[in-house]
Image (cartoon, rainbow, N blue to C red):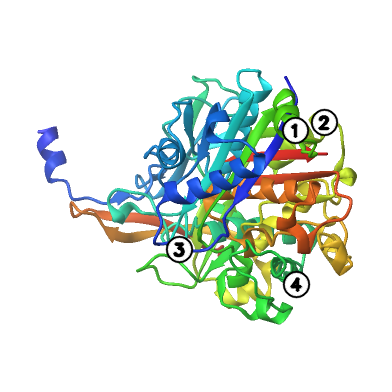
């Protein structure tokens, strides 16, 4: 039964393994006892301390702060530009690369200091459909509402 | 470890050679270096070849199939943009260790008009993150490194742009440079934006090219140099990216450079003030700015001031601590695997007052360094002294 269910499953899939869709979409990290944090959920070991059995999954906060950003004008064919890309620091001590939604590219360039440290929150949505017909869910960040 | 000297160098003008193959380009540079050294291919005992985009295609052996199949050990090196300089280090180590007396390093690449690098993976394109989870192209990664400096120290866009103006000015004196046109500050600032803050002229071009070096022991130097002074490899350092907080999300190009720089100065027994010229990895103008500090050419947070006081500019143009007098990657070009060896050629030509650097000689150059970053990450620094 389980195999059959899997074969006919057309439910949404996360674009990257650290995006969890249940119970509600959120990011999950791996935390080592030494304090190092990772997004990659299937690690051989902690690359800071080398320990193999000290890594535990941790649900990550939906809120973070922009560390740095860029405005992308040239990308690959089919990718709409310009858009703002950012490195977002999460309070758990890990950084995430994502598109910044609802931030005007030209304004960001004019006043970069207003983008540095900007409080942002996670938003998710369907970004594509894969070859097997699954909706592929991606995430971005937008300026925090509170 | 034994002393190792650069006996000969060769380089072809960086540009576009669609009519030639990678082994032909590499072979041409190798022949120039072999003749410059005053030896023949039969004297070469070991060969390390750096090439990135055909790294599974035995480029080293195919070069020997062009210029001399002597049956020597040949190895193919791939280390992102540090590919050529890592090949140079392999050749250096093979002589320093005492295993061989004459080694050859070649860096070669044929990129064509490859466009952007980085960002795209394989598999089902629905799972490609580029454009969905921000961007990971090279102009973005290095653009962000520049903005990190702006965030910390209030660096201005003009500072980055001035680096491109300087690079292009330097390149007008280098016949090996892919681009030799001057650009004004306005040209750079108003050029098409690629990834903020890097405009078109603040991004290195793609291209084809090759460079080669012959490394020898002291005995062989005496045998072949015929009284010519040749630079010693005072340090040949390679680092990988150590664990830092954001490195796996936002590649940290500074920490591994700082570690390499510290080790290189210690091994060479000199400091930044003794360096007459630096060729550093200006894949983007933003990268050059952060490396001024990473290589100790100025203090932390002082790169903007360094630029404003003509730091990095050729002495003949009223500058000091010259950086990338060749035109750098921004103007001379950046055929990935060739870059690391070409930078070493440039330093050698100043130390030996070679005619190939005639119009841009840095006077009284006794020590110089060549720095390369390969994203992913690898950093090499080679310090040469005479």
Q: Is residue B137 left or right of residue B197?
A: left
Q: CA distance from mark 4 to mark 3?
A: 26 Å
Q: Which residue is identified by label 1?
A: B235
- Sequence-wise, the earlier of marks 1 and 4 is 4
User: For the residue labelled by badge 3, is the local secondary structure a helix, a strand or a loop?
Assistant: loop
**Whether residue B247 is visible:** no
Q: What number is the disc on residue B115?
A: 3
Residue at left offset 49%, top offset 19%: A53
The spot of residue B124 in percent (x, y) is: 27, 51
Q: Is residue B158 left or right of residue A26?
A: right
Q: What number is the disc on residue B158?
A: 4
Split into 4 quadrants, where in the image is the C terminus of chain B?
Answer: top right
- Sequence-wise, the earlier of marks 3 and 2 is 3
User: For the residue labelled by badge 4, is the local secondary structure a helix, a strand or a loop?
Assistant: helix
Mark 2 neighbour density, 10 Å: few (under 14) some (14–19) many (20 or more): few
Residue at left offset 65%, top offset 39%: B38
Towards the viewer: B222 or B251: B222
Towards the viewer: B51 or A90: B51
Q: Which residue is identified by label 2?
A: B266
Residue at left offset 45%, top offset 61%: B17
State if disc 1 and disc 2 touch (CB < 8 Å).
yes
Residue at left offset 29%, top offset 60%: A128
């Amino acid at each position: 039964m389980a195999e059959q269910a899997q074969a006919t499953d057309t439910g949404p899939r996360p674009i990257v393994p650290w995006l969890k869709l249940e119970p509600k979409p959120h990011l999950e990290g791996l935390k080592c006892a030494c304090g190092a944090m990772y997004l990659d959920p299937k690690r051989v070991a902690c690359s800071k301390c080398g320990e193999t059995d000290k890594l535990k999954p941790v649900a990550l906060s939906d809120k973070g702060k922009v560390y740095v950003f860029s405005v992308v004008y040239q990308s690959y064919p089919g990718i709409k530009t310009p858009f703002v890309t950012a490195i977002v620091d999460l309070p758990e001590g890990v950084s995430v690369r994502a598109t910044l939604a609802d931030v005007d590219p030209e304004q960001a360039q004019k006043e970069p200091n207003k983008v540095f440290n900007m409080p942002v929150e996670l938003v998710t949505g369907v970004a594509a459909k894969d070859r097997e017909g699954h909706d592929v869910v991606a995430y971005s960040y937008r300026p925090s509402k509170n | 470890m034994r002393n190792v000297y650069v006996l000969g160098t060769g380089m072809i003008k960086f540009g576009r050679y669609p009519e030639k193959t990678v082994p032909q380009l590499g072979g041409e540079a190798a022949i120039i270096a072999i003749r410059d050294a005053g030896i023949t291919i039969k004297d070469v005992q070991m060969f390390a070849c750096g090439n990135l985009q055909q790294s599974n295609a035995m480029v080293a052996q195919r070069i020997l199939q062009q210029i001399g199949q002597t049956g020597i050990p040949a190895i193919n090196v791939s280390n992102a943009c540090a590919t050529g300089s890592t090949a140079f280090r392999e050749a250096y180590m093979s002589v320093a260790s005492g295993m061989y007396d004459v080694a050859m390093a070649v860096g070669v690449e044929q990129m064509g008009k490859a466009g952007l690098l980085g960002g795209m993976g394989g598999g089902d394109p629905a799972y490609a993150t580029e454009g969905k989870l921000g961007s990971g192209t090279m102009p973005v990664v290095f653009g962000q490194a520049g903005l990190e400096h702006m965030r910390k120290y209030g660096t201005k866009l003009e500072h980055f742009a001035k680096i491109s103006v300087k690079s292009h000015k330097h390149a007008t004196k280098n016949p090996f440079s892919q681009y030799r046109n001057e650009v004004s500050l306005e040209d750079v600032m108003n050029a098409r934006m690629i990834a903020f803050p890097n405009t078109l002229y603040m991004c290195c071009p793609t291209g084809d090219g090759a460079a080669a070096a012959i490394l020898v022991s002291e005995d062989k130097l005496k045998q072949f140099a015929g009284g010519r002074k040749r630079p010693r490899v005072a340090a040949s350092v390679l680092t990988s990216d150590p664990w830092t907080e954001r490195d796996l999300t936002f590649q940290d190009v500074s920490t591994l450079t700082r570690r390499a720089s510290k080790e290189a100065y210690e091994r060479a027994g000199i400091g930044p003030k003794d360096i007459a010229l630096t060729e550093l990895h200006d894949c983007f103008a933003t990268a050059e700015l952060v490396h001024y500090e990473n290589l100790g050419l100025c203090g932390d947070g002082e790169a903007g001031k360094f630029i404003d006081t003509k730091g990095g500019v050729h002495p003949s143009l009223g500058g000091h601590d010259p950086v990338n007098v060749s035109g750098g990657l921004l103007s001379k070009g950046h055929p990935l695997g060739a870059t690391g060896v070409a930078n070493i050629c440039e330093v050698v030509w100043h130390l030996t007052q070679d005619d190939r650097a005639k119009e841009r000689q840095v006077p009284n150059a006794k020590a110089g360094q060549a720095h390369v970053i390969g994203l992913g990450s690898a950093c090499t620094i080679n310090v040469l002294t005479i």
